[in-house]
Image (cartoon, coloured by chain):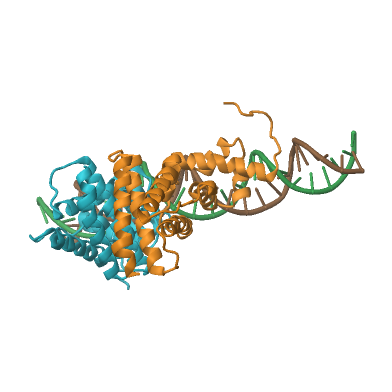
Chain colours: A cyan, B orange, C green, D brown
Amino acid sequence: MSVDAGQRRRLEPDARREQILSVAVRLFGERGYADVSTGDVASGAGVARGLVNHYFGTKKELYLEVIRVMLTVPSSALALVPPGDLATRTESIVCWFLDVVSRHSTSWLGAINAGGMAGDADVDRVITEAVDVAADQVLTAVGFVEPNAALHAMARSYVGLATSTAREWLQRGDLTRAQVHNLLTATLLTMVDRVFPDA
Amino acid sequence: MSVDAGQRRRLEPDARREQILSVAVRLFGERGYADVSTGDVASGAGVARGLVNHYFGTKKELYLEVIRVMLTVPSSALALVPPGDLATRTESIVCWFLDVVSRHSTSWLGAINAGGMAGDADVDRVITEAVDVAADQVLTAVGFVEPNAALHAMARSYVGLATSTAREWLQRGDLTRAQVHNLLTATLLTMVDRVFPDA
DNA sequence: GCGCTTGTTGACACCGTGTCAACAAGCCGC
DNA sequence: GCGGCTTGTTGACACGGTGTCAACAAGCGC
C-alpha cells in the first residue's frame, strides 16, 4: 500500500487537488461527515493538514465538492430514452435509475441522505440540484416537457420514492431488484395517469 | 422575557432535565446540529454548560433525545382507522398523515431528514423506528396484518414518498394540500393493487 | 442554627479547525 | 553546475467546542 512514502513531493495544483479529493470521497463515503477529520484526509493523502485547507478552504467546502462528485452521474449514461409507448419508456427510465444507483450505490445513497449534514443550506442546494436532474430525466422520459412548477415537484416526490425504495433494496436487502422494478414502474404509471394531470 | 434571572435555583432532576430538553428541541429545530453548541443550550436554559453533560452525557445523546421527542407522534392521534372499503380507509390514513406532519411540520420534517446528522448509526436507528411506526400505520390501514419483511420494506418506501411529497408541500410550497392528497392516495391504491401482492 | 444530601458550577485538558509566515522543491538563465 | 525565483508545502499558532471533575452551595431534616 506504500504509494510513496518518500520525501515531500511537489505536484501540480490540479493533480494534488484531485488526489486529495479522491481520498476525501473515499473517507466520506465510508464514514459520516463528523467522523472524518481534515487530518484524516490529509494523512490519507500523505500530506500536511494545512494543504487541505489551502486547496478547499474549509472542511464544509471540501465536503460540498465530495457530494458533488458523488452525485454527478457520468454524462455518458444520461437518459437516452428510446421511442415507444408509455409503458416501454417507463420501463427504460426505471431501469436506467436502477443501473445508475446500483453501479455506485454506496456513494450515491450515502450522499443523497447527506452522510452527516442534511439541513445545511449549501449541502441541501447541491442535493436538490441532483434530485432535480433526476426528476427532469423522469419527466422527459414519460413525455412531459412543459416546465410546470407543480409537475417538477411531483417528479421530485417520485425521485424521493425511488431513493427510499433503492435504499430498502441496496442497504437493507429486504427487497429484490424485481420487486423494486415493479414498484417503481407501477407507481410511475399511475402518477402519469392520475396525478400529473393535476399540474 | 426574563423568566428568572435570579440566583442559581435548585430544581428536581426531572424538571431540570425536561427544561433543558425543551430548549434543545427548540434550538435544534431552528438551526442544524452543528450550528447549535451545548453552550447555546445551556445559556438558553440559564444554566452552566456542564449541567447539560451531567444530564444527557454527550451532545449526541442529547440530540438523540431531541429527535426522539420530535418524531414521537402523540399517541392520542394514533391511527383510528374507520371501517369501510379500501378507498375510504386509504383516504383516512392519508389525511391522518397530512394532519400529523402539518401540525408540527418544522420539527417533524427537520428531524426526518436529520437536521445535521444523517449517516450516524444511532441517529439512523431512531429515524428508522419512526418510519417503521408510520409504515405499520399504513399497513394496518389498508388491511395487511401479516408481518412480511418485503411488505414492510414496501410500506417504508411509501413513507419515503409521503415524506418527500410533504417536503415539497410544506417547505417548498410547490404543491397544494389537495395535490399532495391526490398523489398519495392514488399511489397507495396502486401499490395495494399491483405491488403489495409481490410480497 | 447545624449538617447532610445533591443539584450545580467553573476551571481544566483535549481535540478539531482555520490561518499564516516560513521553508524548500523544482525550474530557469547564466 | 549554480544562484535566484516561483510557488507548492509545511508546522506552529490561536481559537472555539466538548467532556470531565472536584469544589461549591441551595434546600431539607434535625
Please tell me which residue lies in front, A20 or D4: A20
Please tell me which residue lies in front, B22 or A45: B22
Where is residue B156 shown, x and y percent of the image? 38, 59
Where is residue B92 shown, x and y percent of the image? 40, 48
**What residue sits 60% from the left and 26% below the top?**
B2
Question: Residue placed farthest to the bottom in the image?
Answer: A1
Q: Is residue A12 visible?
A: no
**What residue sits 22% from the left and 45% below the top?**
A152
Question: Residue placed farthest to the top in the image?
Answer: B1
Q: Is residue A126 left or right of residue B112?
A: left
Q: Is residue A157 visible?
A: yes
Residue A66 is drawn in which quadrant? Answer: bottom left
Task: Say if A188 sits above or below B101 in the image.
Answer: below
Give the mark count.
0
**What residue sits 20% from the left and 52% below the top?**
A193
Where is residue A184 shown, x and y percent of the image? 26, 61
Task: Say if A195 sits above or below A110 in the image.
Answer: above
- Which part of the image, by quadrant, shows the C terminus of chain B? bottom left
**What residue sits 68% from the left and 45% below the top?**
B13
Where is residue D26 shown, x and y percent of the image? 75, 35
- Which part of the image, by quadrant, shows the N terminus of chain B? top right
